[in-house]
Image: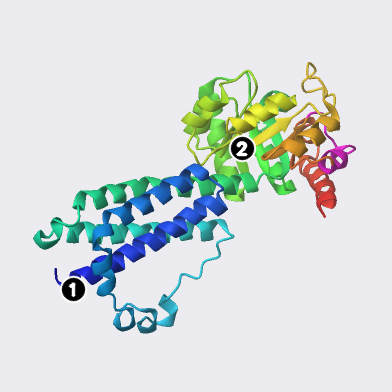
């Protein structure tokens, strides 16, 4: 076998192995996702096994010092991507760059393996399969990073835009005031309107929220959430089962679940909820049948929860500090914002009080 071919195979194997290791560590440390990390590790080990018989020959032809692709021969500005992996875009760039690096390397080896003098030692189809497997892994990594970014943007004021409570007021105008006031999340809730009417409203709200980098959540309706590409879906105990929602909803979307007890919270967490809405914390006129669970339940949940906690029910200017102090990552409100004449001002006051606790 020509030594040039061995050097090409060696360089591309190293490149693919290094890229896979970066992706594996992203899954492990950034996403804390054991399943995805294992899939990447398996792919890396499979490639190593596929080329095990060539290992000594490859090493014998390695000449990094005189390789024109060595960093010493590359202009300084092209040596690294200089990415900030703590940011969303930095993380996405990290995954994309390394996935492409691996995919390109696998394609090179795949083509070389088709040559008559190489085909008896390397199976071209194995590298093709690995490349296609990586396309899926890249998609899953990108989606999960996007989902994690949404989860990290959850803390703050979570305003439920209840159309029945609005009683005919313009949803977009109210939503603009909510956004200007500093809310982190807007949820659209409507138990009565027809889906066709709700779809048009949801599309406009989604666009508005996207422009302002505010999360947009749909209450109850999985089909509507998917139709408008909402950031997520919120469900209750009597809605579609959480595992079904998690299976059907794209993996970059977040799912929240309402709970009133610790056992419900544990179940929701184990079934894939990205956040848990606990309440009603206090008695509320918005949902008169709701049983107030108090801040003690919130405190207990905080000790066992590994996902974000959203407190809901009867929260207002007078008790929001107590709720945040008890451990709420976000606070969901309806009447304390929508019931005020100055919606923007009501949001600003609540956000200011929440921020004081966090400082």
Residue designated by label 1 = 3
Bounds of the magenta segment? 313-325
Q: Quadrant of the C terminus?
A: bottom right
Residue extending furthest left?
116
Residue extending furthest right?
318
Label 2 CA crowd tier, 10 Å (few <14, some 14–19, many 20+): many
Q: Quadrant of residue 188?
A: top right
Q: Horizontally, is 149 left or right of 332 in the view?
A: left
Query: Within the magenta stretch, is there residue 173?
Result: no
Q: Nearer the viewer, residue 86 or 1?
A: 1
Q: Horizontally, is 105 left or right of 137 in the view?
A: left
* In the depicted structure, whether residue 355 falls above or below residue 102: above
Question: Picture coordinates of residue 41 (x, y %)?
Answer: 42, 51
Q: Quadrant of residue 114?
A: bottom left
Residue designated by label 2 = 274
Q: Quadrant of residue 191?
A: top right
Name the residue: 27% across, 54% down.
50
Label 1 CA crowd tier, 10 Å (few <14, some 14–19, many 20+): few
Q: Nearer the viewer, residue 49 or 320?
A: 49
Q: Quadrant of the N terminus?
A: bottom left
The earlier-in-sequence mark between 2 and 1 is 1
**Mark 2–mark 1 CB contact (< 8 Å):** no
Cα separation between marks 2 and 1: 53 Å
Q: Which mark is residue 346?
A: none
Question: Picture coordinates of residue 270 (x, y %)?
Answer: 61, 31
Name the residue: 63% across, 18% down.
238
Q: Nearer the viewer, residue 193 or 48?
A: 48
Q: Is residue 179 visible?
A: yes
């Amino acid at each position: 076998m020509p030594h040039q071919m061995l050097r090409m195979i060696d360089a591309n194997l190293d490149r693919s192995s290094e890229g896979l290791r970066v992706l594996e560590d992203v899954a492990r440390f950034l996403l804390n996702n054991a399943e995805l990390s294992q899939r990447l590790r398996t792919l890396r080990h499979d490639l190593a096994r596929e080329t095990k018989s060539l290992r000594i020959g490859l090493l014998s032809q390695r000449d990094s010092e005189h390789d024109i692709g060595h960093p010493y021969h590359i202009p300084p500005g092209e040596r690294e991507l200089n990415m900030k992996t703590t940011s969303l875009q930095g993380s996405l760039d990290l995954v994309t760059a390394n996935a492409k690096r691996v995919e390109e390397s696998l394609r090179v080896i795949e083509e070389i393996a088709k040559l008559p003098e190489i085909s008896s030692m390397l199976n071209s189809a194995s590298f093709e399969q690995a490349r296609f497997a990586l396309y899926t892994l890249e998609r899953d990594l990108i989606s999960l990073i996007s989902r994690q970014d949404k989860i990290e943007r959850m803390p703050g004021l979570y305003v439920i835009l209840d159309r029945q409570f609005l009683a005919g007021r313009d949803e977009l105008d109210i939503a603009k005031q909510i956004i200007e006031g500093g809310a982190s999340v807007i949820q659209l809730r409507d138990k009565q309107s027809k889906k066709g009417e709700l779809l048009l409203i949801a599309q406009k709200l989604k666009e508005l929220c996207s422009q302002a980098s505010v999360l947009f959540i749909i209450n109850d309706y999985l089909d509507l959430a998917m139709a408008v590409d909402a950031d997520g879906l919120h469900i209750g105990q009597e809605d579609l089962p959480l595992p079904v929602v998690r299976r059907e909803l794209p993996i970059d979307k977040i799912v929240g679940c309402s709970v009133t007890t610790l056992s419900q919270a544990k179940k929701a967490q184990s079934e894939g909820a990205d956040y848990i809405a606990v309440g009603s914390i206090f008695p509320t006129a918005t949902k008169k049948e709701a049983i107030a669970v108090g801040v003690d339940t919130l405190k207990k949940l905080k000790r066992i929860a590994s996902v974000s906690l959203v407190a809901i029910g009867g929260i207002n200017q007078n008790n929001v500090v107590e709720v945040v102090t008890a451990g709420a990552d976000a606070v969901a409100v309806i009447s304390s914002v929508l019931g005020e004449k100055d919606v923007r001002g009501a949001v600003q006051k609540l956000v200011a009080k929440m921020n004081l606790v966090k400082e």
